[in-house]
Image: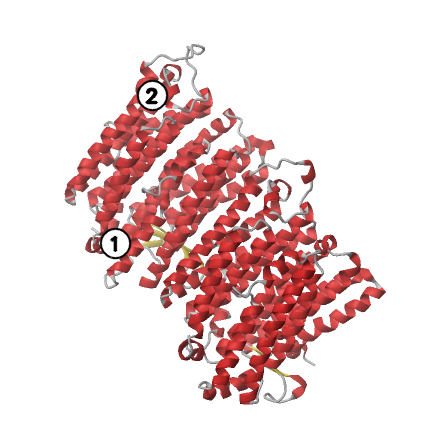
Amino acid sequence: METSISIKPVLAIAVSAVSAFLIAITGEKLRNLRETWSILASIFKFLIVVSMLPDILCGKVIEYCLFRITSELILHFRIDALGLFFAMTASFLWIITSFYSIGYMRGLNEHKQTRYFVYFAITLSATMGVAFSANIFTAFVFYEIITIATYPLVAHKETEEAKKNARKYLAYLLSTSVAFQLTAIVLTYCLSGNLYFSKGGNLSNDISSSLLTITFLLYIAGITKAAIMPLHSWLPAAMVAPTPVSALLHAVAVVKTGVFMILRVVFYIFGVDLLKSLNLETVLAVVASFTIVAASVIALRQDNLKLRLAYSTVSQLSYIVLGAALLSPSALKGSIFHIIAHAFGKITLFFAAGAIYVTTYKTKISELDGIGKRMPLIMASFTIGALSMIGVPPFAGFISKWYLSVGAIESDKIFVLAILAISTILNACYFMPIVYVAFMKKSKDSKYNGINEAPIFVLIPTVLTAVLTLVVFLCPHPFIKLIILIVNQTFGG
Amino acid sequence: MNLSEHSSILIVVIPLIASFVNIFLNFLQRKLCYPFFVLVLGICVALSIDILCQVINFGVLRYRLGGWMAPWGIEYVIDHLNAYLIVIVSSMSFIVAIYSKDSVKKEISKAKLPYFYSTYLLLATGLFGITVTGDIFNLYVFLEIASLSAYALVAIGEKRSVLASFHYIIMGTIGACFYLLGVGYIYIITGSLNISDLTRLLPSLYESKVTLTALAFFIVGIGIKIALFPLHRWLPDSYTFAPSAVSAFASATVTKVGIYVLIRISFTLFEPKFLIEMTPLSNILIWWSTIAIFFGSLIAIGQKDFKRTLSYILIAEIGYMVFGINIGNKEGFIGAVLHILNDSLMIGCLFMIAGGVFYRIGSRNIEDFNGLNRNMPITMAAFTIAALSMIGIPPTAGFFSKWYLIVGAVKAGYLVSAVILIFSSLVNALIFFRILEKIYFTKNENTPMYNFRELPISMMIPIVITALAILIIGLYSGEIISSVIKFSLPKGF
């Protein structure tokens, strides 16, 4: 594979770190200037990331070695199609979320907005870091930075409840990453002598299988950001954060960092052949299947809208993990497509939930009777997001489910088909009632009868992401092209 | 005369003379005491850097006192390990000296101040002496100089410090006695006190019971001096009630120099194979230190007093270093020696911050840390960095030494100890994030009492410098290992 050396990955990471600094020194008094930094940074970041696309599409890999700390611990970036795909998704959605954040935070007159924007920018920097990392050490460094930078965002409200949930958030993410992930990394180093992600896997076959099994399980338990059960409950806890945080970070950036790292571990640390010989892919598939169903069942019982969405995220993330665990090209295609499909769908849903809160201060599903008549555009977007999550054509979610099903048949795991079917039904069960009460029932409080949409900064991003969910279904070819490249790079075809 | 040739003796003599001069200076012009004191330690830093450069460029330095030949006269031998230690000790003593200006004013009566400076210089003299000397009896002399001045410095503190100091004297004296007995036994059978001479003489006497007894006395004696659990009882009280500057200085240097003595005795005076293969001693020390890490961390959780918490964390950290030295592989040793530097920065920084908080709010209780970020944002940012390093989050320095320690533990097959090391990281996470939550997210109820600003500049600069050092030195760990620590590896590692 051709390699070109470029400083672009560092720039893409630095641009939001610099903006975080500018935001901090600009402060609350010049809030328009402060928000300009956020928007500029998000646009520049996306442009830098996209500017790497032509090289990647030619089949090249972009590398940059930032810092050689010791002989094995090296801060090293290497961007392949998979990394770029994730980086593009996250950085593109940041632009939309930046506008949404402004509308949301100002609409609610939130306190400490400067702190909020600073840590938001830092989190995006670190997300790019994970996407671009060439070895598991670099990924681990940025993974930890994400954990710590999102902690102030979760604790944002500073109420007892917010602090309690932030504590839980940190306890889950930090302790598992230090206890399990770090141990797994140490074991990887002791077993193979280096920490690089390499095609076909870094670890070799001639090591005792029990040690390999332990290492793999430690990775799966240590990458808690993927919210695989039973280590998922930090994600519902994180819903106490302002909605844009839940939308971009806890539906896209942070959680996808988790599944992205699982993809890296499965395909680039262990490799297909090694996992097959150890039969570990079945373990992962079973755990992911369990998560898909169990989280959906729990979602059914949530009355708080954001909590229901959070459990839906837990369930949907495991689709991606399941796609990886099937170890077949089609399943991987579905898995990667789901990164983007879920991103657009779920961010729409969260945006809609936030829009409802900004306008009406309602958080519970039982209070949403007739809300569709009051906020038709928002609820239409919500419906599109929900349909995409269920996997109904013509929305993005359908395509990933299609590929996943093909992959399940390819790799002879028929039970996965059943899981997908059950999950689809459950998804419908927890999303459709919301759509039903919103449009069909009469509002209980008669004060508001006319149309009363959310503020413009909140409304437009919501509608935009909803439209994009449709667009991704209608012309998926640019994405599919990149995904085929990823699959080829991964399976070496 | 070439001054550089005499650096190794000057670094001991200059602070020794200065400590007496300082007292006379007090009668002439009291104002000059502090600048003089800082100047002397500044000269020591310059000398220590000169020594380190000489060692790196020309190899081991040998300085014969009074021109007497080696086994008869006292010889100062400086290799990479001492040079490294001297730089750490001199830099920390210099940094804390700057810090002490305003800090001690609050905690020590004015009349005692010159004596504080003199004793501080004496403690520095003792520590420099221990690190430069190549003679085990001379080492004892300096050990006593350092200990006696440390007792005095502790006793200058608040009311309860006198009792703490008394406790320290009793334990310290027992430790010194044990060490001296060890020296006596060695002298009886070999007739020599010079370390390089003994290295040659001792191997033929390894079978002798006297050698074993001497070694046992050495280890227990040093064990008391470095507060290796359960010989740690003197430490928490002393470091809690001593003036903050003393706690910062002593915690950053005294125990580290003790670790240095342990390395010298274990691997220079005796051959590594004597401890590791011929006696079960290193095995005993591994389990002993594992227990120290476990209990040090565990007890630290329950403390309400911040300085006391730090003291117990220090006890756990000492366990880290003793553990790393004894596992008998390259990684463990590198981890331990690297941790000497990192820990002295971290614990020094944290004790200085504890002193800073006490300076402003007059309390060391963690409960009173609520909302401190509003008043002291820079100090608290430094606190955050030091805390993350204590937990071992990359890219702070603490991660890298911990990485080597864990890799060493896994490679040597001490999995229980590896688990305990990680447990200790988690405990640190628990302790520090509990405090961080108070600092950043808890509002203070009694605001009027808390109307103050940042620390005075003389206290802030040292804190900021150490915090930045923690951030930067971590990235240069590889550099430090390849240019200094690699050369101090014992034979056969």
Residue B86 shown left or right of residue B36 in the figure:
left
Label total for image: 2
Distance, label 1 to label 2, CA atoms, is 43 Å
The answer, for residue B376, to whether it is visible in the render is yes
Query: Where is residue B411 drawn, in percent x and y?
Result: 36, 66
Disc 2 marks a residue whose amino acid type is: Ala
Q: Nearer the viewer, residue A104 or A287?
A: A287
Query: From the viewer's perspective, is residue A215 above or below residue A284?
Result: below
The part of the image, by quadrant, that contains residue B311 is bottom right
Disc 1 marks a residue whose amino acid type is: Gly
Q: For the residues tagged 1 and 2, is the chain the same?
A: yes
> Mark 1 touching mark 2, by CB under 8 A?
no
Query: Where is residue B450 drawn, in percent x and y?
Result: 67, 40
Query: From the viewer's perspective, is residue A365 above or below residue B431?
Result: above
* Marked residue chain, label 2: A
Query: Where is residue A356 drawn, in percent x and y?
Result: 42, 22
Residue B21 shown left or right of residue B205 in the figure:
right
Circle 2 SS class: helix
Query: Where is residue A246 drawn, in percent x and y?
Result: 41, 34
Q: Which mark is residue A108?
A: none
The part of the image, by quadrant, that contains residue A477 is top left
* Marked residue chain, label 1: A
The answer, for residue B40, to whether it is visible in the render is no
Residue B356 shown left or right of residue B302 in the figure:
right
Residue at the image position 37 percent from the left and 41 percent from the top: A255
User: Which of the two discs, 1 and 2, labels the residue nearer the N terminus?
Assistant: 1
- For disc 1, the marked residue is A271
Coloration of the structure image: secondary structure
- For disc 2, the marked residue is A380
Residue A274 shown left or right of residue A465 in the figure:
left
Circle 1 SS class: loop
Residue at the image position 45 percent from the left and 20 percent from the top: A360
